[in-house]
Image (cartoon, grey):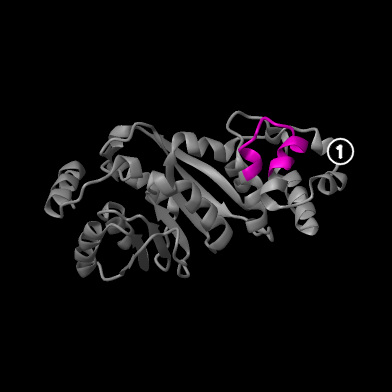
Amino acid sequence: MEEDLLKWTLRIIKEYNIKPKRRLGQNYIINKEMINSILEAAEIEPDDIILEIGAGIGTLTIRLSKLAKKVIVIEKDKNAIKVLLKISEKEKNIEIIEGDALKINFPPIDKIVSNLPFSISTPITFKILSEVDFKLAVLTYQKEVANRFFAKVGDRDYSRLSVAMSLMAEVEKVGDFPPDCFYPKPKVFTTVVKIRKKKHNIDWSNLEDILKILFSQRRRKLKVALNTYCKISKMNYNELLGIIDKELLEKRIFEIKPEEFIYLSNIIKKGK
């Protein structure tokens, strides 16, 4: 892959009849400086086992395989898998898993390094934070999604992603990259982030349901938003209001701190 990355990418997708779909966020990196930034941030050691989600045509995979002990790639595009199989004939430390990353159980790994398809970036983030044991992840996101990771209580971008990141991870921005770093060009800037998972004992399945419903009403007061939650969850609304701190009930959803969502989750779990 010594030739120009754009030329290489165009040649491969033509040869294997690959049609990248913008709506799915299938954008291949064609900028070597961006790849170098990702690899440097990943702090790869020779004995690391790396997971790559949505490996595409292997642009990042090839570089990862030269640095790590093993690279496990997950890809569901059958034509892209043909490219990855060809690469793995030469790079013997690449294992290919065909399937939907949102639906399969991940194998034991040390780090996750991926140019994530934009279409699954949010649900896959929740999955790795709640289900996967890893030392470090370096991942790509639409800039507007990455902004939510760093948002504080009351900010415009404060969301359930902000809460999850605050409670379950330490996150650091590596850099922002323009659309012309990819083929095809996305319509937005891309942000590379570094994520280190915190140790926690959060009941994520319970908390996730609460965050999803409440943040769909982020400007409402908690006492109002809980009415919707109770209808969906078939809980007694008046009983629930009676056991929640009165000051918290008067806060709007975007004003509630991450640790207060934990308190709320524990209260609701007891009441179910």
Look at the image and tell me whether residue 123 can be seen. yes
Quarter holding residue 178: top left
Look at the image and tell me whether residue 67 can be seen. no
Q: Is mark 1 on a helix, strand or loop?
A: helix
Q: Which of 143 and 48 is in front in this view?
A: 143
Q: Residue 104 location in percent, x, y?
A: 44, 65
Q: Residue 49 location in percent, x, y?
A: 42, 66
Quarter holding residue 44: bottom left
As drawn, 53 above or below 48:
above
Q: Is residue 222 magenta?
A: yes
Q: Residue at x 55, y 62 (%)?
A: 131
Q: Residue 184 location in percent, x, y?
A: 25, 38
Q: Does the magenta stretch include residue 20?
A: no
Q: Residue 11 location in percent, x, y?
A: 13, 48
Q: Residue at x 65, y 34 (%)?
A: 218
Give the number of marks. Answer: 1
As drawn, 37 above or below 250:
below
Report which residue position mark 1 lands on: 246
Residue type marked 1: Lys
Assign the magenta stretch its main secondary structure: helix
Magenta segment: 213-228
Q: Residues within 10 Å of mark 1 (few under 14, many from 20)?
A: few
In this picture, residue 267 sits left or right of residue 158: right
Quarter holding residue 89: bottom left
In this picture, residue 164 sits left or right of residue 9: right
Q: Residue at x 26, y 71 (%)?
A: 92
| Quarter of the figure with the C terminus | bottom right
